[in-house]
Image (cartoon, rainbow, N blue to C red):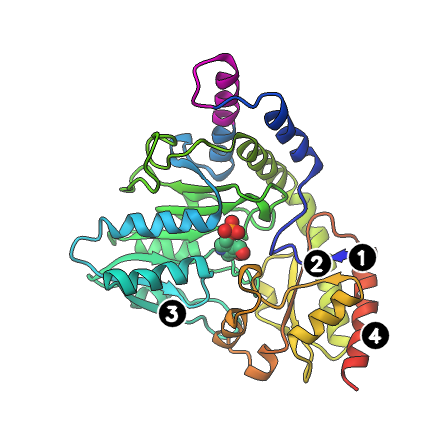
Amino acid sequence: MIYLDNNATTQVDRRVLEKMNLFHVEQYGNPNAVHSMGVTAARAMEESRRKIASLIEALPSEVYFTSSATEAINWAIRSSVCFKGKRNKVVVSSIEHKAVLNTIKDLANTEGILVEQVRPRKGGIVSVEDLVRHVDDNTFMVCLMAVNNVLGTIQPFEEVANALLERDVFYLVDAVQTVGKIPFSVRSSKCSFAAFSAHKFHGPKGAGTLFISSETRRRPFITGGGQESGMRSGTQDVAGIVGMAEAMEIAVDELDRVVPKMRELRNYMASSVRKLGGIINGDMSSSIPNMVNISFPKIKGEVLANALSDAGVCVATSSACSARSESSQKILEDAGTLPEIASGAIRISMSRFTTLEEIQSFIEILSNVVAVLQI
Ligand code: PLP
């Protein structure tokens, strides 16, 4: 099996698993209990909070643990609505993840929130001017992802932050696809909120982080026993949190070593795809180094992905949580890809564990599969 769907999720790093196991079977105390096992668990959890804070250049008190990035995003947006005052508008890019778009859609239906979606320019990058032009006195929130999960394009999230400095708006940056691919700091992105997800960087599923800047007003998301400083109640998943911190530390530590290797493999893959008559979607020169989004004229993405799966290769046709929806097609079309090319798109995404041999085998399999499907 050749796994090339690492933007959807990644293999847990064995070093991460080892750390987590300790908190599943030995130090399994409730981190909110007063006894020694509870204290051990709480110490590990707070150490993880400090570690994540230092890796993203935040204060430990600005780091909250959640069950996923989707939860973190819901929290950030739904909390901001409580402080909107008379203002009513949210400005978002049209290529945000469904976690953002559907949360705002829900608020549009239930609270009458006005949504303005800003399409990217050709290639899949949102222009700062296009976005900021929509921000007016009625706007209380702006959401821009750091990296698009379908195209891999890096968005101007820091430039947008600078343009918003004088504005009194909440600014959410979905940083899910940054870790292990590009450097990311909440200080330089000057955001109110940033969301992360452990399973995207060789950590466990079910663990996310929401950064909330100390200057940002916030509401509790889940009420109950008062965990996470009273903001997100429910007994914390200590093993998941320890695993997330360990995985993030490894990803950040290995970034300089991993990026050139991934970029080389990505460039090799892109030139091989072009030689086979394929098309690269999106602006590859401004994208994360681990992926390409490609199409072959006259072959549907789902047909190609299924044929590759039968041949032992896992790739994506869409963002994983909505594989059967039209969402990636829309993102591609918003980025200027022709509909007939967008419907053929597949996303190939590597991890730091992907080898040259795997990519060589993939290209060989792709070449055979495309030849058969094009007949
Ligand atoms: N944001 C982006 C850009 C993503 O790629 C994903 C996952 O596909 C999410 C948010 C949601 O992350 P999670 O699976 O932790 O809810």
Q: Tell which circle, 2 or 4, labels the residue nearer the N-terminal end.
A: 2
Q: For residue 133, what is the image quadrant? A: bottom left
Cα–Cα span, label 2 and label 4: 17 Å
Q: Which mark is residue 4?
A: 2
Q: Nearer the viewer, mark 3 or mark 4?
A: 4
Q: Which mark is residue 358?
A: 1
Label 2 C-beta lies within 8 Å of the nearest ligand 1 atom: no
Magenta region, residue range:
31-47
Q: Residue at x 53, y 70 (%)?
A: 325
Is label 1 in contact with label 3 (beta carbons under 8 Å)? no
Which is nearer the eye, 178 or 196? Answer: 196
Tag 3: amino acid: Val
Q: Position of residue 246 (x, y in %)?
A: 60, 33
* Labels 1 and 4 touching (C-beta < 8 A): no
Instruction: Give the CA distance from mark 2 to mark 1.
Output: 9 Å
The residue under the point 74% across, 52% down is 354
Cα gap from disc 1 to disc 3, whole angstroms: 38 Å
Residue 118: which disc? Answer: 3
Q: Is residue 313 left or right of residue 122?
A: right
Kind of residue at badge 2 = Leu
Up-down: is 3 above or below 308? Answer: above
Is 177 drawn above or below residue 37 in the view shown? below
Do the numbered discs 2 and 1 sit on residues whose CB atoms are within 8 Å? yes
Farthest left residue in view? 86
What residue lies at 73% left-to-right and 75% top-to-bottom?
274
Say if residue 362 shows up in the picture.
yes
Which residue is identified by label 4? 368
User: The residue tagged with tag 2: helix, strand or loop?
Assistant: loop
